[in-house]
Image: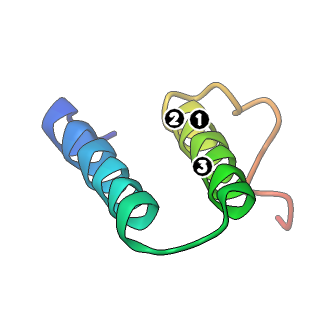
């Protein structure tokens, strides 16, 4: 399991990347909205997997 500092650094880095993408890459508002929703869903799924919320669903291990 990762420690709190590594966890915070990863979240800050991902947030920074999406902030840069939102501010410096020209795109339509709808595309930006969809990308932001996908980013939030991805982070929530990553956090759920990290903390063991999805262990009973076997997300990521469906091929085994």
Of the 4 image quadrants, the one containing the C terminus is bottom right
Q: Regarding mark 3 in the picture, which secondary structure is present there?
A: helix
59 to 47, vertically: above or below: below
Quadrant of res 62: bottom right
35 to 50, vertically: above or below: below
The residue at 83%/35% (across/down) is: 57
Q: Position of residue 41 (x, y in %)?
A: 66, 42
Q: Position of residue 55 (x, y in %)?
A: 70, 33
Please tell me the numbered disc located at residue 26. none
The residue at 66%/57% (across/down) is: 29
Question: How far, Cα to Cα, is label 1 from label 3?
Answer: 12 Å
Q: Position of residue 44 (x, y in %)?
A: 59, 35
Question: How far, Cα to Cα, is label 2 from label 1?
Answer: 5 Å
Which residue position holds label 3? Answer: 36
Discs 2/3, front = 3
Q: Tell me if 37 is positioned left or right of 47 in this view.
A: right
Q: Tell me if 17 is positioned left or right of 47 in this view.
A: left
Check if mark 2's residue and mark 1's residue have beta carbons within 8 Å. yes
> Which sits in the foreground, 59 or 31?
31
Q: Regarding mark 2 in the picture, which secondary structure is present there?
A: helix
Which residue position holds label 1? Answer: 44
The residue at 59%/39% (across/down) is: 49
Question: How far, Cα to Cα, is label 2 from label 3?
Answer: 16 Å
Q: Tell me if 19 is positioned left or right of 3 in this view.
A: right
Check if mark 2's residue and mark 3's residue have beta carbons within 8 Å. no
Discs 2/1, front = 1
Of the 4 image quadrants, the one containing the N terminus is top left
> Which badge, 2 or 3, comes first in the chain's sequence?
3
Please tell me the numbered disc located at residue 47. 2
Q: Position of residue 59 (x, y in %)?
A: 76, 47
């Amino acid at each position: 399991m990762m420690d709190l500092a590594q966890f915070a650094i990863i979240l800050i880095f991902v947030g920074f990347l999406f902030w840069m993408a939102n501010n410096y890459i020209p795109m339509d508002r709808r595309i930006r909205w969809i990308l932001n929703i996908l980013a939030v869903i991805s982070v929530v799924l990553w956090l759920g997997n990290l903390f063991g919320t999805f262990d009973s669903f076997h997300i990521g291990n469906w091929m085994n």
